[in-house]
Image (cartoon, rainbow, N blue to C red):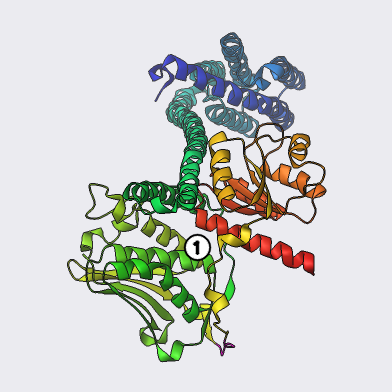
Amino acid sequence: MTRSQLAPIQLLEVQRELFRLGYRNLRSHVFGQICLSLLVAAGVWAAAPHQRVMLWALSMQLVAGVLYAAVWFFRHKVARPVPDPQVLRQWQITNFFLVSIAGLAWGSLGLLFVVNAQVSNLVVMTSFAGALAYSAVSNVYDMRAFYASVLLGTVALTSQLPEIFGEQAPFVIGMCVLYLMVLVLIARSTHRTLIDSIQLRLDNEQLALTNAAHAARAEKANRDKSEFLAAASHDLRQPVHALLLLIEAYRQSEPQAANHPLIQKIAAAGTSVSSLFNALMELSRLDSGTERVTLEGLDLPALLRDTLEPVRPKATYKGLAMRLRIASTLEHVVMRTDKLLLERILGNLLSNAVRYSAKGGVLLALRPAHGGHGLWLEVWDTGVGIAPQDHERIFDHYVQIGNRERDRSKGLGLGLAIVRQSTALLGLRVTLHSRPGRGSCFRLHIPGELFMQMELPQVSTDVAQGEQLSKGVLAGRRILLIDDDVMVLQAMQALLGSWKIDLRCASVGTLRLVLDQCGPHWVPECIISDYRLPGELNGVALLDALLEHFPNVVGLLQTGELAQNVQAQAEESGYLVAFKPVSPDVLAHTLCAVLDRTSETRTA
């Protein structure tokens, strides 16, 4: 591609690059002009008239001085990030003049020819050939200047050849012309390659800038989306949280209406929305890469038995048999893993198995893998099965086979996505074997390095281990509640009031005003604070400040935020986090647990 084929904007960019290249080459011209001319003068000194040699060498140094003056003149202009068109025009004119003068100066080598001085004349011809070759390499950034330079130099030199070579002059001139033509062809090819390489580099730079701009826009869009989702999630979670609390408060205050079909449907709708929020939050945490894996040694058979219990009531209601089968050699297997992640995986698999099985049963099995390479942890069902072409797709977000109507009773399409990401975090691999109409088997392969056989001490399974914490034990406990959402505050007041809790409430994020709500003599046992509060302090900072006044109090953060840093801040400060909407049962159990621990600490 030549410069005449470029668009105006592209041509200007290429000219700027040629300017910078030409300026760098011009600096080397100064050094070459001085050194090579002195070497030529020394080479012909013995044969050529000394005065002529000295005048020629002096003229070459003057040309070098002119070249250096141009270098000095353009030194600041070339350093500019984007030289303007006027500077480029000045450079083109100046460079044409300088290169032409340099070519003519080297053509004046003919003045150093001496009749019958073969060695001296060979030095002159060789030096001129070298000068032309150097010009063909270093001046390709400006072909007009190159043509003028070599043409002037060749004409000046060949004008002296008839006197020196006599009858052989036409042959020598022909060789010079042929040499010149070859150099011109090489220079033209090099010039095209140079223009193409500059254009390619500029295109790559523009592409990089475009990609960077697109990436920045995508990042900003993703950030805006995340901020929007976080705000929307927070604002949506608040009324759902309040709805669940109000339903439970109503059940507590009106026992005869607790089993009314409308109340049960309202509670089911609220629970469905709550499940969706929790699943989305779980996926958000897994997608963000901030999920931290805590490895510990777990009694795997005991964990499997515990995992079955939450899904057993629904299986019994549907008439499904729930079975656990553990190989006799694996009754005392200890697995090194993250307990919460493994429970999450098994819970989702078991819930899916129960949901999509209309008859038969569900089997949770632990057995050695074939060949003795690890263990297989399997969930079998007798459900609808999954077609082979859907085996990979079902692990994608929101994919539900056979539920195009998006019936919420069949799940949300997020459970298996959570399973795949959780297994990846644990270094496990999940595979599926299924036949439509016959059922499915989800299999986790546990590598040998993650488990070991160990004889564990038998833990007593007394009644206290399985008893449910009673809401009645919360009566009279002192709790300080801080939340700026009036709906949530009223719902919490209604629910906690139904549990006979000694409750004080505040709706501001100012330490002084919160302390005023407590009064001079009332000291809370637990402080429940929302994260997003009006004022300078968020929930974590406010809890930090309040615990300086009430050092023996336990702090509980209650939030509708999806941001990962919220949980990180709370955990760093040592506070439990409850993500809205919070189930009343979960809230009651949490309060019982933390208040019992506080009582034990005070007694100790």
Locate the N terminus and report the quarter of the image it occupies. top left
| Badge 1 amino acid | Leu
> Helix, strand or loop at disc 1?
helix
Q: Is residue 318 left or right of residue 488?
A: left
Secondary structure of the magenta portion, mostly?
loop
Residue 114 visible at all = no
Instruction: Please identify the quarter of the rendering in which residue 387 is found.
Output: bottom left
- Where residue 222 appears, as percent x and y from the top left, is 48, 37
Residue at image position (63%, 57%) is 475
- Where residue 146 appears, as percent x and y from the top left, is 52, 20
Q: Is residue 321 left or right of residue 462?
A: left
Residue 115 visible at all = yes
Residue placed most toward the observer, 311 or 154:
311
CA neighbours of label 1 inside 10 A, class few (<14), some (14 to 19), many (20+): some
- In the image, is residue 36 above or below residue 248? above
- In the image, is residue 52 above or below residue 475? above
Residue placed most toward the observer, 59 or 198:
198
Locate the C terminus and report the quarter of the image it occupies. bottom right
Residue placed most toward the observer, 314 or 26:
314
- Residue 456 in the magenta stretch? The answer is yes
- Where residue 287 appears, as percent x and y from the top left, is 48, 51
Residue at image position (42%, 72%) is 309
- Please give the residue where the numbered disc 1 appears in the rendered image: 425
Q: What stretch is highlighted in magenta?
A: 454-458
- Where residue 483 appears, as percent x and y from the top left, is 62, 39
- Residue 413 in the magenta stretch? The answer is no
